[in-house]
Amino acid sequence: MVTDDLLDAVNAALHLRRPLLLTGAPGSGKSTLVSLVAAELALGDPLKWYITSRSALADGLFQYDALGRLHATQIRSGEDASALRPEDYVTLGPLGTALASRDKPRAVLIDEIDKSDFDLPSDLLNVLEEGEFDIPPLVRAARATREGADGPVLQQVRGADRRMYTVDDGVVRRTHWPVIIMTSNGERTFPAPFLRRCVRFEMATPTVPFLESVVDGYLDKVKGKDRKKIAEFAQRLVSGERLAVDQLLNYLFLVTADHGIDATTRERLENTLLEELSGR
């Protein structure tokens, strides 16, 4: 459910050409917003980058399979080896694909940015502001090819969406400003310069009407004592428990799909599926 204040934040991010940073509890709908925005603006399927503690800026821009090219070179000889093109071993990451898109802007989800190392948030915003980045093996190949030739060297590389994109002289240059939505579970604080360069919005704690609309959108015939679980779940969220909406959906799916479940089994499922996300 997109509220008026969330819609204002989305529009502000679009007009200011800044990333939208969404914070909130797990299951509050942060990650689904990018699909709604992409569908509304006809941007195609959103590109998604799931952040881990090991994620680096290069993961979002491109990957170069140097070992794969070396292996191919070793099993070929003579002219066959010289025909190997470095661009065949480059794959753009989600952010790199969005920057390389020339026909239309692309929407990118950078999910759980708070899991990243300290430098990644600022590094990726620097790339967005500059609007370009080099792919070193392609830059070297373009220099070697351009000797005595006029104009840029055009290279075709594969994107994160499996489409092909054109790179000039080994450099990806932005044609359109991508729509960037970043999510955070609030597990860390960000430096002020990073926050200043984002439009920030905190997702509200899901209410009973919101949860009912989500449940009704996914499941049929949730009535009686099962429907009362929605209000109980909402109360637990208000009290500060860490819970995700999909926990409620999983529980209700199981107990409403098989009416032969007895009370004891229901209780065990509730204890298992609706347990707080405490990490214990």
Image: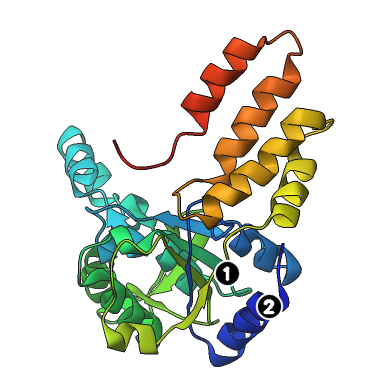
User: In what quadrant of the picture does the N terminus appear?
Assistant: bottom right
Image quarter of the C terminus: top left
Say if residue 64 shows up in the picture: yes
Residue 233 location (% of width, % of height): 60, 44
Instruction: Name the residue: 40% across, 60% down.
Output: 185
Nearer the viewer's eye, disc 2 or disc 1? 2
The residue where tag 2 is placed is 7
* Residue for badge 1: 106
Residue 118, image x and y in percent?
20, 69
Q: Is residue 150 visible?
A: no
Type of amino acid at the residue the image marks with label 1: Arg
Most foreground residue, 249 or 209: 209
Q: Residue at x 64, y 59 (%)?
A: 35
- Which coloring applies here? rainbow
Callout count: 2
Q: Earlier in the sequence, mark 2 or mark 1?
A: 2
